[in-house]
């Protein structure tokens, strides 16, 4: 074998060993819901792919985890989830994680940007739309959330619906992975910069899409839209329920019917994972439309494309709530 051949073979072997060594450092990342899976995938682009526990189209409020999910968690190096306020069934599964695994509840990482749960199912929408997340209400503890562990912190978990929170989560994911896997830190940093640019462009697009609906008063199936209200100026006046697991009382439904008529509600937001019969009952006798909106991010794909598709789907549905639509 010539010296050139030997040199080329040695170079190829060295490159292969380096690639293998880098692959060995790639952490096994497990995520909960589609928005978290999408953001983690965006940061891991070119490095690896995260695992998603809660499938597309399944509500994190009601989804039951399977033994295969516990097996995935048992192999994880890093686990990103929103927190017990949303994925109620996940804490038990997290107990199977290795002691060396890092578990990151993203909602808590937002600090003051995480909004308190609203108390009760009736409120006036359109308040404090200064995007600064200031609060002039005594929100207290939400009623009926025992099953979802909401009593502990009283935080609204649907934070991914504000692209600014998604940006903060992406930064947390990048920092966590860089500390865990320094060999790929430059790639994580580059992916974060790209994701931040994409989120800025997406936020501008979402604002344009939802602007026509901002003047319309809306009643929702459950209180999942507070972050959208604050960021994009939606006017949500109340919810059918604060807990998807609990049916509202007949008294509450009657009160909502009166409120819908009195306040001139234009649209009622149903959710694809839950029957809309009660919302249609509330809408009887008025011209309000029932629109299906999926706040849980049930969009196909992976990486940033999945987050973008989920948010554009929400915006597209909401954009139909306008005069003459």
Image (cartoon, rainbow, N blue to C red):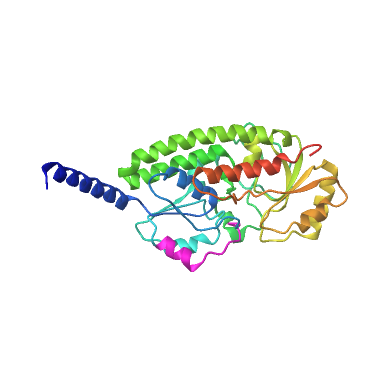
Would residue 310 be visible to someone looking at this image?
Answer: yes
Q: Which quadrant of the rendered structure holds the C terminus? A: top right
**Could you tell me which residue is drawn at 85 percent across and 45 percent down?**
287
Would residue 123 be visible to someone looking at this image?
Answer: no
Does 10 sit left or right of 94 as displayed? left
User: Depth check: 58 or 299 in front?
Assistant: 299
In the figure, residue 231 lies in which quadrant?
top right
In this rendering, the count of numbered labels is 0
From the viewer's perspective, is residue 25 above or below residue 91? above
User: Depth check: 19 or 304 in front?
Assistant: 19
**Could you tell me which residue is drawn at 56 percent across and 50 percent down?**
300
- The percent coordinates of residue 45 (x first, y second) are 42, 44
- The percent coordinates of residue 87 (x first, y second) are 55, 57
Return the residue found at the far front.
1
Return the residue found at the far bottom.
67
- The percent coordinates of residue 192 (x first, y second) are 43, 38
> Is 94 colored magenta in this rendering?
no
- The percent coordinates of residue 243 (x first, y second) are 66, 56
User: Depth check: 45 or 116 in front?
Assistant: 45
Does 300 sit left or right of 180 as displayed? right
Return the residue found at the far right.
285
Question: Range of the magenta residues?
Answer: 59-74
Does 40 sit left or right of 270 as displayed? left
**Could you tell me which residue is drawn at 84 percent across and 49 percent down?**
258
From the viewer's perspective, is residue 195 above or below residue 258? above
């Amino acid at each position: 074998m010539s010296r050139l051949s030997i040199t080329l073979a040695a170079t190829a072997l060295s490159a292969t060993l380096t690639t293998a060594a880098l692959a060995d450092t790639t952490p096994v990342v497990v995520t909960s819901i589609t928005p978290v899976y999408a953001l983690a995938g965006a940061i891991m682009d070119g490095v690896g792919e995260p695992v998603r526990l809660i499938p597309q189209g399944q509500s994190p409020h009601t989804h039951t985890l399977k033994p295969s999910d516990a097996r995935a968690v048992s192999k994880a190096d890093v686990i990103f989830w929103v927190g017990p306020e949303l994925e109620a069934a996940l804490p038990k599964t997290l107990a199977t994680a290795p002691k060396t695994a890092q578990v990151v509840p993203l909602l808590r990482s937002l600090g003051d940007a995480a909004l308190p749960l609203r108390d009760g199912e009736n409120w006036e929408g359109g308040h404090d739309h200064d995007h600064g997340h200031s609060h002039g209400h005594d929100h207290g503890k939400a009623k009926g959330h025992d099953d979802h562990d909401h009593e502990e912190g009283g935080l609204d978990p649907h934070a991914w619906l504000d692209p600014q929170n998604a940006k903060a989560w992406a930064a947390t994911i990048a920092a966590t992975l860089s500390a865990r896997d320094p060999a790929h830190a430059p790639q994580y940093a580059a992916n974060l910069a790209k994701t931040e640019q994409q989120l800025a462009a997406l936020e501008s697009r979402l604002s344009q899409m939802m602007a026509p609906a901002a003047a319309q008063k809306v009643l929702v199936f459950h209180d999942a839209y507070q972050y959208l209200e604050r960021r994009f100026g939606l006017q949500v006046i109340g919810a059918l329920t604060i807990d998807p697991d609990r049916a509202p009382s007949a008294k509450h439904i009657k009160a909502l019917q009166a409120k819908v008529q009195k306040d001139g509600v234009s649209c009622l937001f149903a959710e694809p994972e839950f029957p809309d019969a009660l919302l249609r009952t509330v809408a009887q006798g008025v011209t309000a439309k029932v629109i299906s909106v999926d706040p849980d991010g049930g969009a196909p794909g992976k990486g940033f494309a999945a987050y973008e598709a989920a948010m554009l789907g929400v915006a597209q549905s909401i954009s139909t709530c306008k005069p003459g639509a």
